[in-house]
Image (spheres, rainbow, N blue to C red):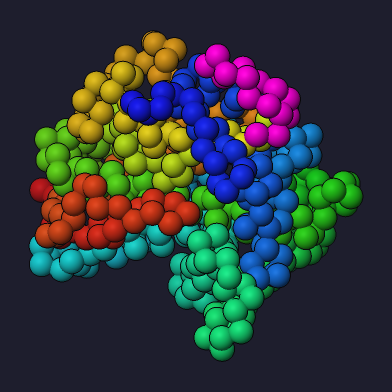
């Protein structure tokens, strides 16, 4: 950025892309209702080695009107008012994790917290969204991991799609089997719920119930069939599980390197929760310092480092006329380290977010994106993170195992702590 400026072009062979790191331009691009998601960016999620995966779900639909129509169907199910009614389910999953960690809180056992966060977020998402208990379903967990690995391989090593080597053929089939298992799990869940509704049985008050009610059990819209619902089933797990788990793992790594911040969070958690093992929805708003720490974690370590748009028409960006059809890449990871917007950008300082009155902060980083394609699960993720982190810090002391460096990061489709956030745990007094 210091060499090329905030807006510059890169060429991949003969194809140009524009990198945009200027807040005013970010605002213009993300708030546009005409620029669209580049198909080249999301096509790797459409299918995995020929097996339908996310297809044209909320995450991967490039057509703006179609995306807005689907988004309108799902938005109310992710509103704070609706999620408030599901807070007991969030607490149930938290209790399972707390009980498990209590058994290894001896100060000697190394606990890879990234793995535990992944299990927790999968459990929460399955229960809150679909009324499923998948915590002990190792096959489903493995299928999620395998399907994501397939996407990553298609992106980083595309030749494996056509490789004749037996090992590669076996790998492709394992990935396809994983995707089939995820979609069949979703199909059974949806069909069972529809059948239960028709029999007049009591059904869970979850996100699936809301969607089926709004779509008349998938009968009202020819653009939202069972297969489309399964696209979204896959999308929820891919977009909502590992992203939040990685963020919480980064947060815990930072707390390990900043014990003063951890102590302040523990004090706040105990003041808000007391001895209660149940977090009320109203408690979440009282965790003010927790929110600052989450924001600072996302500034430095956004699980998704950026997004892009393909210009639907010519656009002026920082004095340059960018022609229609050009992909524009917006990088929140880099922008979060801009010392013009964030003094001492590599310093972990949650207090920098106390004053949020300046408009510039809205567009200097965007971990949940913005505009019509902002993350639909933002409130879900924040509820999840604040609830479990407050419970963990109320209950345990954490100490990083050796080798857990702040900047030791593994970058795949998402970024995550390379050391898996290994910790020693003891019970808090």
Q: Residue 325: within the magenta?
A: yes
Q: How many marks?
A: 0
Q: Is residue 419 magenta?
A: no
- Position of 272 with respect to 383 (left or right) is left
Reply above or below: 341 against 98: above
**Which of the 4 image quadrants contains residue 171?**
bottom right
Residue most toward the front? 14
Q: Residue furthest bottom?
A: 166
User: Quadrant of the rendered structure where residue 178 is?
Assistant: bottom right
Q: Position of residue 406 (x, y in %)?
A: 21, 47
Closer to the camera in the image, 275 or 119: 119
Residue 183 in the image: x percent, y percent? Answer: 67, 67
Residue 346, x across and y down, in percent: 23, 33
Q: Residue at x 48, y 59 (%)?
A: 122
Residue 348 can be seen in this image: yes
**Observer-nearest of 369 and 40:** 40
Q: Residue at x 75, y 35 (%)?
A: 64
**Most foreground residue, 351 or 270:** 351
Q: Is residue 16 left or right of residue 90?
A: right
Specify the segment rendered in magenta.
312-326
Q: Is residue 122 above or below residue 252?
A: below
Task: Give the residue displayed 25% in from the left and 56% down from the top.
Answer: 421
Quadrant the N terminus occupies = top left
What is the chief secondary structure element of the magenta stretch? loop
Residue 289: horizontal and vertical position, in percent?
Answer: 27, 28
Image-based side of 162 in relation to 34, left or right: left
Q: In the picture provided, is 20 more to the left or to the right than 344? A: right
Residue located 34% across and 56% down the image: 410
Camera sees residue 368:
no
Above or below 232: residue 147: below
């Amino acid at each position: 950025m210091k060499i090329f400026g905030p807006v510059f072009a890169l060429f991949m062979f003969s194809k140009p892309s524009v990198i945009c790191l200027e807040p005013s331009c970010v605002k213009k691009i993300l708030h546009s209702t005409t620029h669209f998601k580049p198909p080249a960016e999301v096509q790797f999620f459409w299918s995995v080695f020929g097996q339908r995966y996310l297809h044209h779900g909320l995450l991967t639909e490039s057509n703006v009107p179609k995306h807005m129509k689907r988004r309108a169907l799902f938005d109310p199910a992710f509103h704070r008012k609706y999620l408030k009614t599901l807070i007991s389910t969030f607490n149930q999953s938290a209790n399972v994790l707390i009980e498990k960690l209590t058994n290894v809180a001896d100060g000697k056992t190394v606990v890879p917290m990234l793995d535990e966060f992944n299990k927790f977020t999968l459990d929460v998402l399955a229960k809150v969204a679909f009324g499923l208990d998948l915590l002990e379903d190792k096959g489903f967990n493995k299928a999620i991991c395998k399907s994501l690995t397939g996407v990553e391989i298609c992106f980083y090593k595309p030749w494996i799609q056509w490789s004749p080597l037996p090992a590669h053929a076996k790998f492709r089939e394992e990935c396809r089997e994983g995707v089939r298992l995820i979609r069949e799990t979703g199909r059974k869940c949806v069909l069972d719920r529809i059948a239960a509704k028709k029999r007049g049985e009591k059904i869970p008050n979850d996100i699936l119930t809301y969607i089926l009610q709004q779509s008349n059990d998938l009968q009202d819209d020819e653009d939202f069939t069972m297969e489309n619902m399964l696209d979204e089933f896959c999308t929820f797990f891919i977009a909502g599980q590992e992203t939040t788990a990685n963020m919480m793992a980064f947060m815990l790594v930072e707390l390990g390197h900043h014990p003063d911040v951890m102590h302040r969070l523990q004090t706040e958690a105990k003041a808000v929760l007391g001895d209660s093992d149940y977090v009320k929805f109203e408690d979440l708003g009282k965790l003010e310092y927790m929110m600052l720490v989450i924001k600072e974690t996302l500034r430095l370590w956004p699980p998704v480092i950026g997004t892009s748009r393909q210009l639907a028409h010519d656009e002026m960006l920082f004095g340059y006329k960018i022609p229609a059809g050009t992909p524009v890449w917006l990088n929140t990871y880099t922008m979060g380290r801009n010392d013009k917007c964030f003094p001492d950008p590599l310093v972990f300082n949650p207090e920098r977010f106390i004053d949020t009155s300046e408009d510039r902060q809205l567009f200097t980083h965007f971990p949940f994106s913005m505009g019509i394609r902002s993350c639909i699960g933002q409130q879900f993720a924040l509820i999840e993170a604040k609830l479990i982190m407050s419970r963990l810090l109320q209950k345990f002391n954490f100490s990083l195992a050796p080798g857990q460096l702040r900047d030791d990061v593994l970058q795949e489709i998402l970024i995550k702590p390379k050391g898996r956030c290994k910790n020693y745990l003891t019970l808090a007094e």
